[in-house]
Image (cartoon, rainbow, N blue to C red):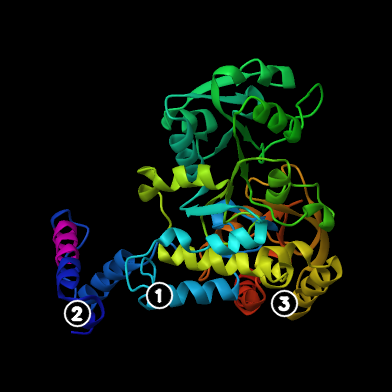
């Protein structure tokens, strides 16, 4: 009865049948001589039930020092974003209801006013991720027509998704200009006569160095506008703050693209913006209106929870509190002395390991090759690979990294409220090694 109360009658019966089938099979093959006691059958059934109902998506402790770890879900959200998303999930809302008129409204207005105020743009729309933002923009503005893009920008953005494939899927006719390493303004100008759009894709996940050349975005925009062709900028990471302020290389910002005269800018919500997964499209009213009206807009639209979270995140920037409230910016801006003090505190509480200098990275397809000073708890263990595996098997799982045959835990990416859980896991595992 306890199993039925916990897991429901149909699933419990399924687990009991599976357990009995396994028992019969073991008896037939001689692996088991007698039927087990009822308590053992129930115990095996409960093991099945526990395995079947255990969520595959679960929280982990990121001690890697990679701030926007794509495999670990990228940006953790601010308290305000979490609260806004919880309220949107818990309650009914005016998602598509005009409170003033009492008639049907549009979900497209949510977050738009904040984006217009924050970035000074004419219009905006939020969709479910940046790949769909680019796909939607191209589908709405350039289907069956020519789009000019530099050959050096035909990149793969991760997971096997490639910019040329996204462009082709939109129905746009891809016109490549320049070479892999050299693109000149004249290359663009030669193809503008028959084009309806120029696209720039920021190479956010790798660098090109050496014998390279590419015109400034302002020059591309100037040439395109002179020919009457609008420009779309796929900016990717969605930086609204200058990363150079924190000792990193400069990541192009949305504001810079808009200042260069770009007509439509697409960027992510869950990278350097620090919000939930989303694709944000901002720009000129006439172009955004076409994007909003395209049939694909419904297929890639953001849901109420995403809209609530992205709006709350954008408000941090509008109120000039992003560095204080958004977790990834708190991590990036945290002084090295504070990170070191936390690592030293961990070592004292564990009675093991020591604080060691290390390097943290932004990650998430942003600032490739860039790292900045950090400090981690360094532990000597018998087998680093086995220890890392044991860390992943804990509740919650801990993801760390091996460095110089030691295990390193970087406090910069461990949320303060996770300290107790992390140290409990380490106490337990280190006790087993004694």
Q: Label 1's element? A: loop
N-terminal label among 1 and 2: 2
Label 3 or label 1, whichever comes before in sequence order: 1
Residue 303: in magenta span: no
Q: Which residue does the numbered mark 2 point to in the structure image?
A: 4
Q: Is residue 163 visible?
A: yes
**In which image quadrant can residue 193 be found?**
top right
Depth check: give the residue in front, 59 or 43.
Answer: 59
Residue at screen point 18% across, 63% down: 18
Q: Is residue 340 left or right of residue 105?
A: right
Along the viewing direction, whichever of 327 and 114 lies nearer the viewer: 114
Q: Residue beneath label 3, please? A: 350
Left or right: 308 as drawn, with respect to 14: right
Q: Which residue is mark 1?
A: 100
Give the alpha-carbon distance from disc 1 to disc 2, as whole Å: 49 Å
Horizontally, residue 190 falls left or right of residue 17, namely right
Label 3 environment density (alpha carbons within 10 Å; few <14, some 14–19, many ≥20): some
Give the answer, above or below, for where 112 lies relative to 417. above
Q: Nearer the viewer, residue 85 or 377?
A: 85
Q: Position of residue 380 (x, y in %)?
A: 74, 62
Q: Residue furthest top?
A: 190
Q: Position of residue 262 (x, y in %)?
A: 65, 40
């Amino acid at each position: 009865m306890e199993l039925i109360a916990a897991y429901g009658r149909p699933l419990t019966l399924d687990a009991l049948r599976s357990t009995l089938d396994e028992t019969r099979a073991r008896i037939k093959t001689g692996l088991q001589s007698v039927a087990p006691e009822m308590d053992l059958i129930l115990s095996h059934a409960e093991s099945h039930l526990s395995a079947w109902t255990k969520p595959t998506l679960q929280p982990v402790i990121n001690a890697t020092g990679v701030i926007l770890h794509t495999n670990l879900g990228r940006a953790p959200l601010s308290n305000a974003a979490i609260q806004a998303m919880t309220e949107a999930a818990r309650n009914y809302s005016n998602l598509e209801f005009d409170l003033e008129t009492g008639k049907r409204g549009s979900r497209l207005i949510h977050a738009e006013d904040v984006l217009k105020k924050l970035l000074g743009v004419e219009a905006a729309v939020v969709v479910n991720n940046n790949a769909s933002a680019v796909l939607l923009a191209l589908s709405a503005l350039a289907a069956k027509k020519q789009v000019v893009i530099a050959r050096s920008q035909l990149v793969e953005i991760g997971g096997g998704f490639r910019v040329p494939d996204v462009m082709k899927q939109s129905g746009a006719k891809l016109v490549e200009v320049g070479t892999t390493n050299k693109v000149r303004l004249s290359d663009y100008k030669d193809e503008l006569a028959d084009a309806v759009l120029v696209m720039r894709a920021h190479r956010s996940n790798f660098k090109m160095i050496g014998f390279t050349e590419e015109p400034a975005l302002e020059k591309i925009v100037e040439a395109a506008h002179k020919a009457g062709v609008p420009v779309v900028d796929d900016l990717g990471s969605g930086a609204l703050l200058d990363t150079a302020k924190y000792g990193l290389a400069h990541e192009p910002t949305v504001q810079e693209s808009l200042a260069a005269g770009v007509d439509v800018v697409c960027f992510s919500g869950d990278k350097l913006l620090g919000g939930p997964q989303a694709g944000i499209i901002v720009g000129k009213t006439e172009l955004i209106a076409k994007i909003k009206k395209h049939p694909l807009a419904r297929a890639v639209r953001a849901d109420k929870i995403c809209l609530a979270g992205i709006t709350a995140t954008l408000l941090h920037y509008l109120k000039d509190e992003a560095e204080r409230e958004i977790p990834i910016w708190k991590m990036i801006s945290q002084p090295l002395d504070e990170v070191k003090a936390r690592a030293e505190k961990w070592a004292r509480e564990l009675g093991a390991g020591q604080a060691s200098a290390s390097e943290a990275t932004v990650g998430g397809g942003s600032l490739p090759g860039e790292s900045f000073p950090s400090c981690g708890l360094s532990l000597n263990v018998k087998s680093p690979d086995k220890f890392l595996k044991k860390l992943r098997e804990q509740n919650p799982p801990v993801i760390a990294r091996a460095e110089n045959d030691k295990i390193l835990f970087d406090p910069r990416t461990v949320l303060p409220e996770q300290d107790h859980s992390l140290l409990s896991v380490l106490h337990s595992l280190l006790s087993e090694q004694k």
